[in-house]
Image (cartoon, helix red, strand yellow):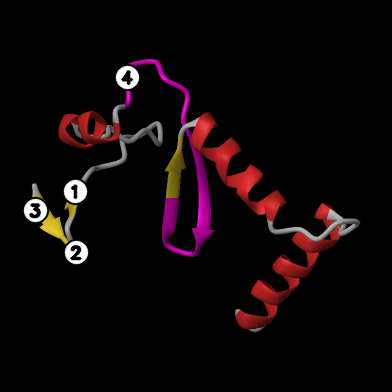
Amino acid sequence: MTKLLGELTEPVHMDKSGRLLIPAAIRERMGWQPGQELILYVEQPGTIIIRTPDQALDEVQKFCLTLKPGQSVVESLIADRRAEAAADGF
């Protein structure tokens, strides 16, 4: 295990079924337990974010607090996605 930018970094290998084993040191540091549900999403190409459902909910709630009264969540999300696509050249 190495440290990269102050965070734990450890190589993992994907098995034939597409499964990844998260090393024990990382699971312990994150407080993850066997059988716990986690949510994975791609933040940008090459970056996978792993959150617990509670962390994901907190993130959504914080986003909603940034909305102005009467502002549509859907319109705001669509505008964000269009801006990201434009930045990526689409």
Residue 76 colored magenta? no
Kind of residue at disc 1:
Pro
Q: Which residue was labeled with disc 4?
A: 33
Q: Residue at x 61, y 49 (%)?
A: 62
* C-alpha separation, residue under disc 1 versus residue under disc 4: 20 Å
Q: From this viewpoint, which residue is outermost toward the top?
A: 35
The tag earlier along the polypeptide, 3 or 4, is 3
* C-alpha separation, residue under disc 4 versus residue under disc 2: 25 Å
Asked whether, in this view, residue 61 is left or right of residue 41, the answer is: right
Query: Against 50, is 19 above or below?
Result: above
Residue 28 appears in which quarter of the rendering? top left
- The answer to whether marks 1 and 4 mark residues whose Cβ atoms lie closer than 8 Å is no
Circle 1 crowding by C-alpha within 10 Å: few under 14, some 14–19, many from 20 = few
Q: Which label belongs to residue 5?
A: 2
Where disc 3 sits, the SS reads strand
Q: Which residue was labeled with disc 1?
A: 11
The tag earlier along the polypeptide, 1 or 4, is 1
| Highlighted magenta segment, given as a residue range | 32-48
Where disc 2 sits, the SS reads loop
Mark 1 or mark 3, which is nearer to you? Answer: 3
Q: Which label belongs to residue 82?
A: none
